[in-house]
Amino acid sequence: MQSLTTRSKVASNKKMTFVEKLYLPAILGGMRITLNHFFKKKVTISYPEQTRPMAPVYRGQHVLKRDENGAERCTACGLCAVACPAEAITMTAAERKPGEEALYREEKYASVYEINMLRCIFCGLCEEACPKEAIFLTDRIIDSGYLRKSFIFGKDILVDPLDKPIDVSVRETKETREFKTHPEFAHNKLNTKSLK
Ligand code: SF4
Ligand code: SF4
């Protein structure tokens, strides 16, 4: 019967020669391969001291963005959680109270927002589903850890730091920028009104 692959080898009962019994040629052959690799360029790097160049649209740790006035953009609509194929996102919605306009952009916000990073497959669908341009994936690599619970990222980790906002401009399309600034769009009017 004809073989399906070319990988099969015919087993042989041929007796080993004297030189083969010394194993020297095989040892020297192995050493030659080791020496060859010794002088080749290393394929490994000393992470985290060294990092490899990454694509600008690399999908790493998420950020929940604030608007230009520092208010959280997320309105707890849940669309990111619905879009997530790994069911990694959970949230609790709350109603904004009078006086909290500077904290939350819209009348509803996420009092709890969690992403289970052990489930996340970094597909970016949450980013695509968000109608408020609130969630983005960034080029930040998630640190390793020993405890599973340390990979449940809450708002303390996810929300954009006020003093050092994460730049996601490279991920924003022209349409996204227009969405955030067009004076005729209702969500931009709401923002201006709420801050008066
Ligand atoms: S990147 Fe994909 S898997 Fe991860 S939270 Fe977003 S939608 Fe879910
Ligand atoms: S991140 Fe976006 S899609 Fe997810 S709940 Fe907030 S506003 Fe909705």
Image: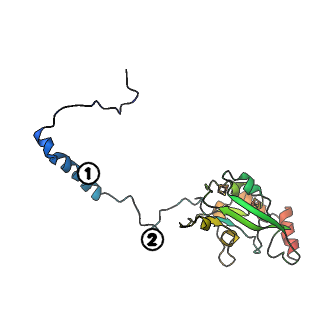
Classify the position of ligand 1 by quadrant: top left, top right, bottom left or bottom right: bottom right
Compared to 25, does 120 lie above or below? below
Residue at the limit of the structure toward the left, as seen here = 18
**Residue 114: quadrant of the picture:** bottom right
Q: Are marks 2 and 1 in contact (CB under 8 Å)?
A: no
Q: Amino acid at mark 1?
A: Ile
Q: Is residue 54 visible?
A: yes
Label 2, on which residue?
A: 49
Is the N terminus in the top left, top right, bottom left or bottom right quadrant? top left
**At x 66% / y 73%, what residue is drawn?**
165
Q: Secondary structure at mark 2?
A: loop
| Image coordinates for residue 12, horizontal then vertical, percent | 23, 31
At a point 84% along the width and 75% down the height, the residue shown is 101
Image position, residue 112 (x, y; %): 75, 67
- In depth, the one of 11 and 132 nearer the eye is 11
Image-based side of 33 in relation to 183, left or right: left
The C terminus, quarter of image? bottom right
Query: Which residue lies at the image location 41% right of the left edge and 66% below the top edge?
Result: 46
x 67%, y 75%: residue: 161
Snapshot quadrant of residue 38 = bottom left
Q: Position of residue 51 (x, y in %)?
A: 47, 65
Distance Cα–Cα, label 2 vs label 1: 29 Å
Q: Earlier in the sequence, mark 2 or mark 1?
A: 1
Crowd tier of the residue under label 2, counting other residues whose Cα lies within 10 Å: few below 14, some 14–19, many 20 or above: few
Q: Can I make out residue 173 in this image?
A: no
Q: Is residue 100 left or right of residue 168?
A: right
Circle 2: residue type = Glu
x, y percent for residue 79: 76, 55
Q: Nearest the camera: 125 or 68?
A: 125
- Please tell me how crowded label 1 is: few (under 14), some (14-19), or many (20+) other residues with Cα within 10 Å: few
Q: Which residue is mark 1?
A: 33
